[in-house]
Amino acid sequence: MKMFNIGVIGLGMGSTVLEINRIPGSRLQVTGICDKDLQKARQCQKRYGIETITDDYTKLTENKDIHIIAVFSPDHLHAEHCKAALQQSKHVICTKPMVTDLEHAKQIAQLTRQKKVKFLVGQTMRYEPQFTTIKTMYDQKDLGDIIMAEAHYVHDMRPVYQMTPWRLEVPQDFMYGGVCHPVDVLRWFLGDVQEVFAYANRGGLEPKYPKQANFMLNLKFKNGVVARILGIYDIVHPPMPMMGVSIFGTKGSAIGSFSDKLGGEVKTVLDKFEIKAESKIAYPPETEGAYGHGATVIRYLKHFEQCLIEDKTPVPDVREGAKSIAVCSAAWESIRTGKPVEVFNDF
């Protein structure tokens, strides 16, 4: 039975990938890790029985015994690390955002095609049970045709800056690093976005953050559906779930919510019932489980494993990831110009 060896770049959220070594029967195994904190890398090496540790990512991308590179480095390094892996014909798993500008998205998509390898974008919200429940309902026609939709991802980033100071130092671009979550989820339901109109401002709660970090997007999809997105990160966290998706269809409406500490729920109203009563499914938080919030990472690793075994295309793949980046790019252009902007989709 062939095993697929993984090299992990970045031990932040990437630490969860190491748990695959403890799952019985998995054909994925982490054999190499790269992190600038070698002390942390040594601790992980001992804990998970990993062969190679390094602070030079090329030692993993050029290692002939490694088949997959898992990129969990800071956002602005994704393009560099993904390109290095693809140039060595490695399969790639890259946490969101895939990259942080449109030109890099085009290059990564082209290189993936040229090398004929598999590329998975780690969009965790596609693997949260609340949102997969709504997607199943939609796929089974319980909601009918979608009329309108909305999604949000909101987060007070001040505590996060303390844990990951690179977000202030680089700084992180929250259109790509944050808004890509709701963009990807809505694209999952509705397909390609045709046009974006967006606004942005600064909250000023963190004076050291120099860029706009609060966004409102109106989206027009190619199928005619319109939707809106709220992505706000320079705010006091509001009394609402961190992530939410609302789908309004011809046969019913569904609203899903997610919070890493509080869990979430799915609420629906279906038109087929005479009394339009609200039904609700509650989902407990996964923070106390074996993998915590990283359970979604384990889910998409298992999905990637099946794609390798059965030679299938991962979901979301490099084209889907690139199209979400293109929406974010168009949103920035709209903010700069004050006009609606057509979205590039020719990947």
Image (tube, rainbow, N blue to C red):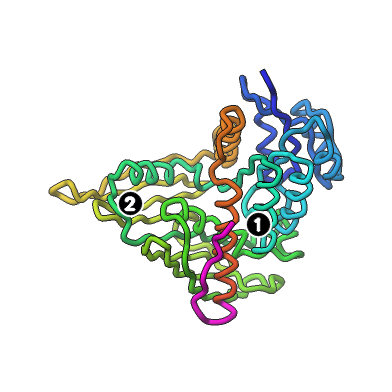
Is 67 in front, or is 74?
A: 67
Residue at 47 percent of width and 66 percent of height = 194
Left or right of residue 34: residue 320: left
Q: Secondary structure at mark 2?
A: strand
Q: In front of the other: label 2 or label 1? A: 2
Q: Check disc 1 and report the residue beneath it.
A: 160
Q: Secondary structure at mark 1?
A: helix
Residue at 61 percent of width and 49 percent of height = 318
Find residue 54 and name its label: none
Residue 24 image offset from top left, x and y in percent: 62, 20
Residue 265 image offset from top left, x and y in percent: 39, 46
Q: Is residue 49 above or below residue 235?
A: above
Left or right of residue 247: residue 70: right
Residue 29 image offset from top left, x and y in percent: 70, 28
Instruction: Give the residue type at disc 2.
Output: Ala
- Highlighted magenta segment, given as a residue range: 335-347
Is 136 in front, or is 207?
A: 136
Residue 234 image offset from top left, x and y in percent: 59, 68
Residue farthest to the bottom, as pictured: 338
Instruction: Give the residue type at disc 1.
Output: Val
Q: Is residue 320 above or below residue 200?
A: above
Res 151 → quadrant: bottom left
Choose the circle earlier in sequence order: 2 or 1: 1
Find residue 254 and name its label: 2
Is 308 in front, or is 143?
A: 308
**Few, some or many C-alpha atoms within 10 Å of disc 2 (few <14, some 14-19, many ≥20)?**
many
Task: Assign the C terminus to one quadrant of the image.
Answer: bottom right
* Badge count: 2
Do labels 2 and 1 touch, CB within 8 Å? no
Task: Assign the N terminus to one quadrant of the image.
Answer: top right
